[in-house]
Image: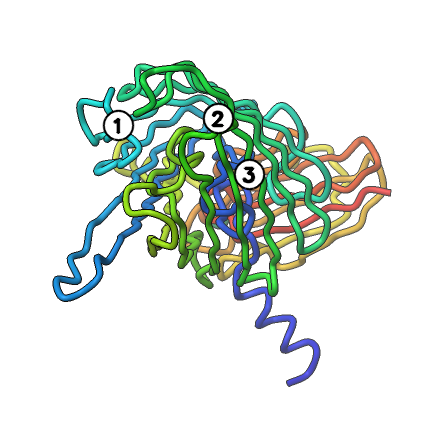
Amino acid sequence: MTRHAWFAVLTLVVVAPLGAQSLLYRPPNLGGTWVPDAGVVQFNFLHRFYVFPGPSHFVENHPTFTLAAGFGHNVTLGGRLATKSIVGTGAAAQSSNETELYARWRVYGAEGRPGLAVAVTPAYNFLAKSVDGELGIDWTQGPVTFHGAARAVSRRLGESGTGAAAFAGGFDVRVTPYIALNADLGSFVSPAGRAAWSAAIDFLIPGSPHTFSLQASNAQSATIQGASVGYAALGPGHVLYGFEFTIPLHLKRFSPWFHGSPKPVARGAAGETVAAEVDMAALKYGKDAVTISAGQAVRWTNRDPVEHTVTFDGAEPGSPVIPAHGSYVHRFDKAGTYTYHCTPHPFMKGVVIVK
Ligand SMILES: [Cu+2]
């Protein structure tokens, strides 16, 4: 194939779905700094299982469901339900259903962008009746991301209800834009209990906003407490295997249920010097990058039968939903590099370079 054809193939296949969660940017037992975009509800299904030795080969399942909604301003509110949480089976625990509500504020940085990102995650664990929290830091350079987390809990599950601190670290290596390897290690500071570890291979599923991982770990829930302690019941060397699947639900996609299909509109077309045109067709931006001068505008035209947006990754205000046959004009007054994506289809990405 020619270089051009390869390029066309590459742009057809997705790259990292920013603005949603990508497992290619987060090891299994670390929350990272990810926050869904405003209007996106993220559903993650983590399923780990332990196979008992023969002759029974009994399989014990440990799922954790995570549901989190993006509210803009880098803030999310979410909850996790871990059924069959062995973290909860100590003397003080009444149940193995571990529920955690959490908020996350990404104070600095953006998911999957080079450089540093910092997030704070206050949480409440209903099984432990514990106020928990995490300070998470990511540092991305090219295909590599390093993670660190400091955690504190006011009543540790299964450990007679005392407070504790935990630390965790991990890394991701994106071998290709679609495949990553990652691992992490985390532990409470106290000597009771085992350190938690995990390792995974992650896949970005082409043509979709979903990511999928195959993983091994000795931890069996994804809450702040569960991710900080290894599965101690059966001693060392007992490994849980599993997978995680990430599903971003873009609420705008469902607006025709309530409002009907929007009418085509042209926005901001009057009085602007349109220096570049970008068509949106076949679920991609016609040009990955356009270069203009400060004060000039770019027009995006939707040639698809579905709605798209032009949503900037930084602070620049972006478009509303652009319906089929609609267009959107945006003037750039300041020099800079403006990366953007489509909120309903986060695998659509582009950049405007303003000189
Ligand atoms: Cu789109």
Left or right: residue 40 versus residue 149 is: left
Q: Is residue 200 visible?
A: yes
Crowding around mark 2 (Cα neighbors within 10 Å: few <14, some 14 to 19, many 20+) is few
Q: Is residue 325 visible?
A: no
Left or right: residue 329 versus residue 295 is: left
Q: Earlier in the sequence, mark 1 or mark 2?
A: 1
Which residue corresponds to the image point at 22% horizontal and 49% vertical from the top-left?
Answer: 61
The amino acid pointed to by label 2 is: Ser
Which residue corresponds to the image point at 48% horizontal and 60% vertical from the top-left?
Answer: 201
Quarter holding the C terminus? top right
Cβ–Cβ under 8 Å for marks 1 and 3: no
Disc 1 to disc 3, C-alpha distance: 62 Å
Residue situated furthest left in the rendering: 56
Q: Nearer the viewer, mark 1 or mark 3?
A: 1
Q: How is the image coloured?
A: rainbow
Identify the residue under disc 2.
Answer: 190
Q: Is disc 1's CB within 8 Å of ligand 1?
A: no
Identify the residue under disc 1.
Answer: 90
Disc 3 to disc 2, C-alpha distance: 61 Å
Residue 214 location, quadrant? bottom left
